Amino acid sequence: MINNILTGLSVLLKNSTVLNRPLHLQVEPSTLCNLQCKFCISVLKLSGKKLTMDKFKYFITSAKPQRCTFSGRGEPMLNPELPQMIQYCKSKNISTTITTNFTIKQMVKDLVQSGIETIRISIDAAKRETYLKIRGKDRFGTILEGIETVNRLRKGKKARPFLVFEYVMLDDNFGEISELLDLAHKLQINCINFRPLQVYDGISNKVGNLIGNIVGSSDTIDRLTEFLNKAKMKGVSTNLKEVILDWHNYVKRQSSSVKKSGGNKMCILPWLQCFVSAEGEITPCCSIFDNEGESFGNVFEKDFFQIWNGEKFKEIRETFKNKQIIYKSCESCPSKGMGFIFKKALAYKFFKK
């Protein structure tokens, strides 16, 4: 409770040095990945880094967040110690979420039994052939089998873990949203989170092929509204209302004229959370680390709170306080001020970020 009050004061006052601990940590268990998604800047990795249980306990015990999300450049379920990390969080009353491609079927049961509270499944398709086209390997059936396993283990749709579909909207899959709603209803999915593709340097030359049609079409909002109405009719919770409200701004953010402006941005995340890579590098969010290779400090080399209130965190807080940006990753990202956070929370009840 005290940390919540301190966090609220930090966000309202926007001080560069804060007294609160982060409410949320995004932790990267692994840089390994078993897929090759067409919109990802990372190449298929056959070797990489894995966060160890001992190192995880070291910084989690220091930071003491209220919530931990397991996600990053790689697939979290490729770290065999992941269930133990989740169990450790549960023992410390830290709520847990994972964003996963959910294709490691041998870990599904252990994941559920670990006490994970929310499983966010990156599915990006309603059909096997579309999944293969977008994600590079045919694992669609494996995902469906995994969901069936979860539904057998949990006690009804209202029981934990909650299941969320993550759906990056592309030209390839936009026409399947109606079918996805049917699939989500059938599989007892708690929520669908639709994500307009965030464009960054590594894929900027592919934008026309990835989202050219939906960004350039005059009827995209009308179609999204049809999907929203169907979701309501099927009883499927989504964030489509929020996507519709922000669509014009999203289209503007893809234009070079807006990207060059570099102003009028606000993000409260540097006061609330941080990203910890598998190597221990810390930034306010994964985009600054992943897209730009920036680090605010390494938690295995320096005390967590020396980084949390270090010069780079203070600089970015001061910059956002003045509604400016210093990182290119922020250019195509929606402003995440208090209004954005509240709108997201109201858009659908399983909003977690």
Image (tube, rainbow, N blue to C red):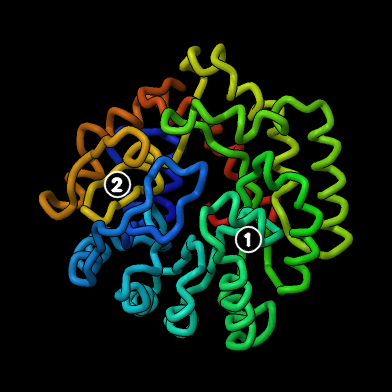
- The amino acid type of the residue labelled 2 equals Leu
Is residue 218 or residue 289 the one in the foreground? 218
| In-image side of 238 versus 9 (left or right) | right
Name the residue at the left extreme.
Answer: 301
> In terms of sequence position, does the residue under pointer 2 or pointer 1 come before the other?
2
Is residue 132 or residue 40 the one in the foreground? 132
Figure check: 147 above or below 270: below
Secondary element at image label 2: loop
Secondary element at image label 1: strand
Mark 1 neighbour density, 10 Å: few (under 14) some (14–19) many (20 or more): many
CA gap, disc 2 to disc 1? Answer: 35 Å
**Horizontal and vertical percent for residue 18?**
30, 42
**Horizontal and vertical percent for residue 142?**
56, 73
Residue 23 seen from this side: no
Tell me the residue at 58%/81% (across/down): 150
Residue 160 falls in image quadrant:
bottom right
Tell me the residue at 58%/49% (across/down): 134
| In-image side of 235 versus 299 (left or right) | right
- The amino acid type of the residue labelled 1 equals Phe
**Horizontal and vertical percent for residue 214?**
72, 33
Tell me the residue at 32%/53% (across/down): 21
Q: How many marks?
A: 2
| In-image side of 291 versus 189 (left or right) | left
Residue 198 seen from this side: yes
- Which residue is tagged 2? 19
Figure check: 300 above or below 205: below
Tell me the residue at 37%/36% (across/down): 291
Q: Label for residue 176?
A: none
State which mark lies toward you, 2 or 1. 1
Q: Quadrant of the N terminus?
A: bottom left
**Horizontal and vertical percent for residue 353?**
52, 51
Q: Label for residue 165?
A: 1
